[in-house]
Amino acid sequence: MPTRKETVWFIALALPLSWAVGAWWLMDERRIILIRLLMCVPAFVALGCAWAFRRETPRAMGLAFTGWRPWLLAMVYPWLMILFCLGLAYGWRAVSGTPDFIRLQPEAYSYRLFGGPSARGIAALGLLAVKWIILLLPWLLVALAYQSHWPDRLKAALPRSLAWLHHGFRALLFIPTLLLHGIFPGELGEETGWRGYLVRRWASRPLMAAALTVPVWASFHLPIVFSSTQKGHPVLNTVFLLSIAASAVPFAAFYLWSRSIWPCAVLHLSWNLWNPVLLGDVYLGRPSFFGGQVRIFNGEALFGLIFNALVAAWLIRAWRRRPATAA
């Protein structure tokens, strides 16, 4: 099947199914598990399309470890965004003379690690950093296992009659992820679909990959704008969707650079972990380390849009200078 038709099928299935789960969640926003399920819909559709159209197995998405540099930059990228937003926020506060635009409020943020004692302020950030590393370790395990071809080595070592057991071994590699991330590992689910399938299909044409994922990934987030914390703010929701759209470009760049879903998932998890904690939770409206006009300086608000748009513009310029290869 031509790549264009595969793309149409994937988008035509992934978006409506995601929106259906989103509508189900909007009936009772306390069911956070439905948000995690929604995030995994692109993976389910991608895996189904990959097998139906090309008989591809999940490892075709890019499950092997492909070097430390993409992983480390994926962990650092959200912090670069946070520092940019904080610098812009404090700059605006100084120029405008509005001290309430942004304020440091560490005492407002508390965190409890795996049901342990609650901590506040810097100590709470320390506990969250521990959780961050713990959540990344299962992914590193799978990536290293595929880099070293452990499942293939097991298959080769087994008698032919038992060779099927290597499929069980592949499944066991993901058990730690399911235990720590839940039955629906959302960030990994999204990246398997949007980057591991959609961007991969257009890897030889980065501009096309970006042009597809920019509107599609923003559209995927439409149920959020109808949530109780975001509905009734059309301008802010427009900026929110534009920020998500712009961020699709650096996410695509991470996949095109690494040819692996892991750095993309690491970036996604790091973003979802640190952005709401430091710059405000625009999804649930919970207190964060910095208070004030969080709907302006958040990483998924105006200042985040500026940061992502600048990075996206730089990447698009670089891709335009690079000759495209045949799709």
Image (cartoon, rainbow, N blue to C red):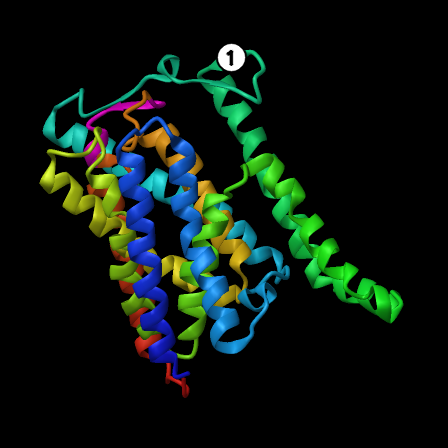
Question: Is residue 268 among what the camera can see?
Answer: yes
Front-most of residues 257 and 10 = 10
Q: Position of residue 138 (x, y in %)?
A: 64, 44
**Left or right of residue 279: residue 260:** right
The magenta stretch spans residue 290: yes
| Amino acid bearing label 1 | Ser
Q: Is residue 80 left or right of residue 50?
A: left
> Which residue, as the protein is rendered here, is positioned at the far bottom?
326
- The part of the chain drawn in magenta is 288-296
Crowd rating for badge 1 (residues with CA inside 10 Å; few <14, some 14–19, many 20+): few
Compared to residue 61, the image places residue 69 above or below, namely: above
> Residue at 24% across / 38% down in the picture?
88
As rendered, which of 208 and 181 lies closer to the eye? 181
**Side (left or right) of 170 relative to 122:** right
Q: Does residue 133 appear anywhere in the picture?
A: no
Report the residue marked by disc 1.
118
Determine the image quadrant of residue 235: top left
- The correct choice, above or below, for 269 with respect to 144 in the image is above
Which residue shows up at 49% across the image and 66% down it?
257
In the image, what residue occupies the spot 71% across and 48% down?
Answer: 172
Q: Position of residue 4 (x, y in %)?
A: 33, 79
Pick the front one: 162 or 67: 162
Up-down: is 90 above or below 14? above
Does residue 271 belong to the magenta stretch? no
Q: Secondary structure at mark 1?
A: strand
- Position of residue 315 measured from the top left corner of the image (x, y, whole percent): 34, 66
* Quarter of the N terminus within the rendering: bottom left
Rendered residue at 46%/41% (across/down): 270
